[in-house]
Image (spheres, rainbow, N blue to C red):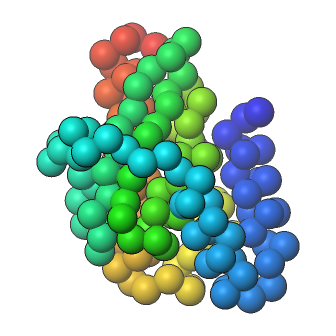
């Protein structure tokens, strides 16, 4: 499934919930399904900068596609990182780099999350795109 279609599907799923309380519960439940990252991978290099809570994000390449792993101890940011991993994993680096991230606006994160959490989403997205760019260049995946 294309990255665009994954974004469309997640917007559709989250839009199904009418209240932000229900949306938060959905996102929190996504975080509960995120496997814990081994403590040895919780390094300074994997830490997402400018987030209210410490969030770690790592990536690896398999069959020219990027897969992300991440972790956070706080429940809402853990759900958000899980959501971002769901959307961006198993995609080619150039797809990630070119993605327009319309889902952030469509879901309405900026309207309902605190400014620091909204900034955290942007910081996660930035780190995801940096990983994509690094893999694209390092492995000449153009």
Can residue 142 be seen by looking at this rendering? Answer: no
Instruction: Please say if 63 is above or below 1.
Output: above
Query: Could you say which quadrant of the image residue 63 lies in?
Result: top right
Q: How many marks?
A: 0
Q: Is residue 97 above or below residue 105?
A: above
Rendering coords of residue 51 (x, y %) = 30, 68
Image coordinates for residue 12, horizontal then vertical, percent: 81, 63
In the figure, 66 relative to 68: above or below? above
Left or right side of 122 for 92: right
Question: Going 59% across and 53% down the picture, which residue do you hit?
Answer: 33
Find residue 58 and report its horizontal and vertical position in percent: 35, 38
Q: Quadrant of residue 122?
A: bottom left
Residue at (33% x, 19% y) in the render: 137
Q: Nearer the viewer, residue 138 or 74?
A: 74
Taking the spot 18% from the left edge, 44% from the top edge, the residue there is 43
Closest to the observer, 86 or 126: 86
* Residue 41 placement, left or right of 21: left
- The answer to whether residue 66 is above or below residue 69 is above
Residue 114 visible to an observer of this rendering: yes
Residue that appears at 50% across and 83% down: 113
Check the image and name the residue furthest to the left. Answer: 44
Figure quadrant of the N terminus: top right
Identify which residue, 114 or 130, lies in the foreground: 114
Q: Position of residue 61 (x, y in %)?
A: 45, 20
């Amino acid at each position: 499934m294309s990255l665009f279609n994954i974004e469309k599907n997640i917007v559709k799923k989250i839009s199904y919930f009418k209240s932000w309380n229900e949306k938060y519960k959905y996102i929190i439940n996504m975080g509960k399904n995120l496997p814990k990252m081994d403590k040895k991978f919780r390094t300074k290099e994997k830490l997402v900068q400018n987030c209210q809570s410490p969030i770690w994000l790592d990536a690896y390449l398999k069959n020219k596609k990027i897969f992300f792993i991440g972790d956070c101890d706080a429940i809402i940011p853990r759900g958000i990182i899980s959501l971002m991993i769901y959307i961006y994993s198993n995609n080619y680096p150039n797809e990630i780099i070119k993605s327009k991230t319309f889902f952030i606006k469509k879901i309405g994160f900026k309207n309902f999350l605190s400014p620091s959490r909204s900034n955290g989403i942007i910081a996660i997205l930035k780190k995801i795109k940096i990983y994509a760019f690094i893999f694209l260049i390092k492995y000449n995946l153009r």
